[in-house]
Amino acid sequence: MPGASGVNVEGSCEALCRTLVSQNGLQGETADISQSVLYTSLMGLLLVADNEKEQLTLGSGRVGLRNIGNTCFLNAVVQCLSHTRGLRDYCLLKSHIHEKFSKEEAKLMEAFSQVLSGLWDVNDGDTVVNPRQFYNIFKEVVPYFSGYSQQDAQEFLRFLLDKLHTEINRRPYVRRPGKEPEQKYARISRLSEEAVAMWKKHLERDDSKIGDLFSGQLRSSLHCSVCSHYSNTFDVFCDLSLPIPKRSSLGGVTLKECLDLFSQEEKLDKENSPMCERCNRHTECTKRLSIQRFPQVIVIHLNRFTTSRWSISKSTVYVSFPLTNLDLGPYGPVDCGPVFYDLYAICNHAGTVNMGHYTACCSDENGWCFYNDSSVTTVSENQLQTNQAYVLFYQRSNSTATIRK
């Protein structure tokens, strides 16, 4: 029967993916996977098994990018993304051609993949890659970046990932009439079920390799001081923007202190608080942020730039951060256990607000390198931590998670 084989393939695919999820230490209730990801995962595994000889052959990756006019922000971010292995391999294999459903032409993705092809050329023929075509296409897609003025690297990263996702979205665009009714979860007894429901709703619209790698879920919990009602909202994030605790110019802080400040309880007065669902009015409340779903790659933005009414200032506080085994478990759901990440790339900003320069430090199989536009030099681990660190890229490690008692 024609229909029967489809069901079997679907069941086999889902069973296989569930097995892989469980082997990687993910909890059952958080292991929902979109249909397209299930098929893609199975097909990918079959292709690997049948075509082991057709693995990617890569160069060293230690190739610079030409500065084409105040584009150090672009060069630093591209080098960091180039060392994001899942994204690099996806681009070099041009996997988006086989799985995209978006109606948009993948012009930016093609140009970005071309840059990565030059950076990872097995012959290392060019010591410098020119990103001009990629940047021109990016400016067409995001006119905000037109011109030759210096731009913010983290802002560029956000726009780039968003536009790449839009081009390679596995979900076809469907126009939804009017405003969707707000979902109520009063009858759902478990908080995790509400989070999973919201995540599935997200995947119905947005499902791409960018999301597979970078997307996580934040939980915002509000506690009303009048009626003691708790309410939760869940939002998708592709990076965490962390405040830096204030210190003297000589005193340093740790990444843990930044994370603690990000997740600490915040008091909101009536003017700044949302409507209490039970009181049906604005009340004083407390707010707390936590990570509900952990991404494979977590991008941590150290918020060094502060905007006031008249000016922008930069913090040069030294922030120390672990190179391996960054445990984000304490900032996740209760009893989720340790969630470990390893650092693989850093985007640095040197100088002032008006006269700054971006560089990158990235790791590969042979150690760390310092990427300064077209220049590439080796660097030791004890040289990585400076007060110039701006955006940190961490990959979730394969350490087996244990449940915290």
Image (spheres, rainbow, N blue to C red):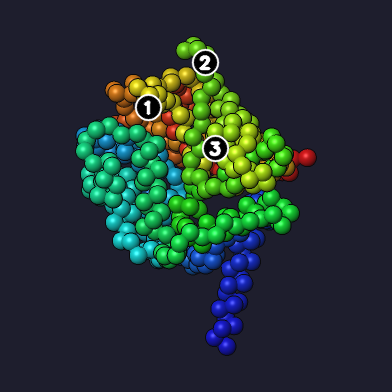
The correct choice, above or below, for 188 with respect to 347 in the image is below
Contact? badges 1 and 2 (CB < 8 Å): no
Q: Residue at x 72, y 57 (%)?
A: 187
Q: CA distance from mark 3 to mark 1?
A: 21 Å
List the residue tagged with mark 2: 247
Choose top left, top right, bottom left or bottom right for residue 332: top right
List the residue tagged with mark 3: 342
Q: Is residue 44 left or right of residue 305?
A: right
Provide residue 269's location: percent of width, then percent of height.
59, 31
Q: Nearer the viewer, mark 1 or mark 2?
A: 2
Q: Residue furthest bottom?
A: 1
Q: Residue at x 22, y 35 (%)?
A: 148
Provide residue 228's location: percent of width, then percent of height.
72, 39
Element marked by disc 2: loop
Image mark for residue 198: none
Provide residue 32's location: percent of width, then percent of height.
61, 59
Choose top left, top right, bottom left or bottom right for residue 329: top right
Amino acid type at mark 3? Asp
Local packing at callout 1 (Cα closer than 10 Å; few below 14, some 14-19, many 20+) is many
Element marked by disc 1: strand
Provide residue 76's location: percent of width, then percent of height.
35, 35
List the residue tagged with mark 1: 349
Local packing at callout 2 (Cα closer than 10 Å; few below 14, some 14-19, many 20+) is few
Q: CA distance from mark 1 to mark 2?
A: 19 Å
Quadrant of the snapshot with the N terminus? bottom right
